[in-house]
Amino acid sequence: MPLIVLASSSSSRRELLGRLGLPFQHHSPDIDETPRAGETPRMLAERLSREKAQALAEHYPHHLIIGSDQVVSIDDDLLGKPGNLNRARQQLQRFSGRRIHFLTGVALLDTRRHHCDTFVDLTSVDVRSLGPEEIEGYLIKEPAIDNAGSFYMEKLGTALFEGIHTSDPSALIGLPLIALCRLLRDAGINPLLE
């Protein structure tokens, strides 16, 4: 079995990949995540996932490298990680009572064959109508300034939701495991048989 590398510094993605019971390493890629002119949220999620995997190809020439990235959109606007509490507050105010979309890309690069497969999952989240005190309370308890959407689904962020519409619950946390298992099987690795 080829060695697996997760191109990410995310502890959530490491935890998710660990659920498959496959040995892997992780290494943080360094790429420019700036959206390109005319790039849709789906295109951006796919490109960033692929580029994260490709950024490590020289270091891991006989491996399977997993790249993943997530983008958030509302009203066709791309929203990145807030980066500070004020922008997180603004994002949560904008999301209040609305449906937002998370596009989570995953890429599997086989550096032995120089072949890369990608997939983008769409998850829609209905956010409750939030009062200012709820937003402040959330940001005090869980300042998710480094996470797309300004919340952590795997933590207290679920208290912000009315509903989640998805075919893969792991995608909202940051790594679509159902799609990844399919990509791994296509590359000759079945987590059930390893």
Image (tube, helix red, strand yellow):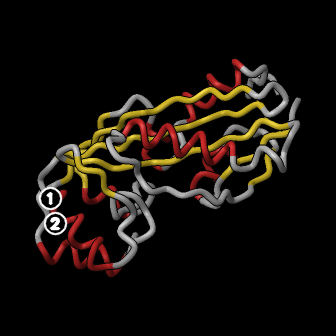
Q: Position of residue 164 (x, y in %)?
A: 29, 41
Q: Residue furthest front?
A: 37
- The residue that mark 1 highlights is 96
User: At 57% across and 29% down in the image, what residue appears?
Assistant: 118
Q: Nearer the viewer, residue 191 or 86?
A: 86
For the residues labelled 2 and 1, say whether their Cβ atoms are less than 8 Å apart.
yes
Dot 1: what SS?
Answer: loop
User: At 23% across and 78% down in the image, what residue appears?
Assistant: 136
Position of 89 with respect to 82 (left or right) is left
Tell me the quarter of the image containing the C terminus.
Answer: top right
Position of 166 with respect to 189 (left or right) is left
- The residue that mark 2 highlights is 93
Position of 9 with respect to 43 (left or right) is right
* Amino acid at circle 1: Ser
Measured Cα–Cα span from mark 2 to mark 1: 5 Å
Quadrant in which residue 57 is drawn = top right
User: At 68% across and 50% down in the image, what residue appears?
Assistant: 7
User: At 72% across and 26% down in the image, what residue appears?
Assistant: 115
Question: Looking at the picture, does residue 148 appear above or below residue 124?
Answer: below
Position of 139 with respect to 14 (left or right) is left
Tell me the quarter of the image containing the N terminus.
Answer: top right
Q: Position of residue 116 (x, y in %)?
A: 67, 29
Question: Looking at the picture, does residue 88 appear above or below residue 193?
Answer: below
* Amino acid at circle 2: Gln
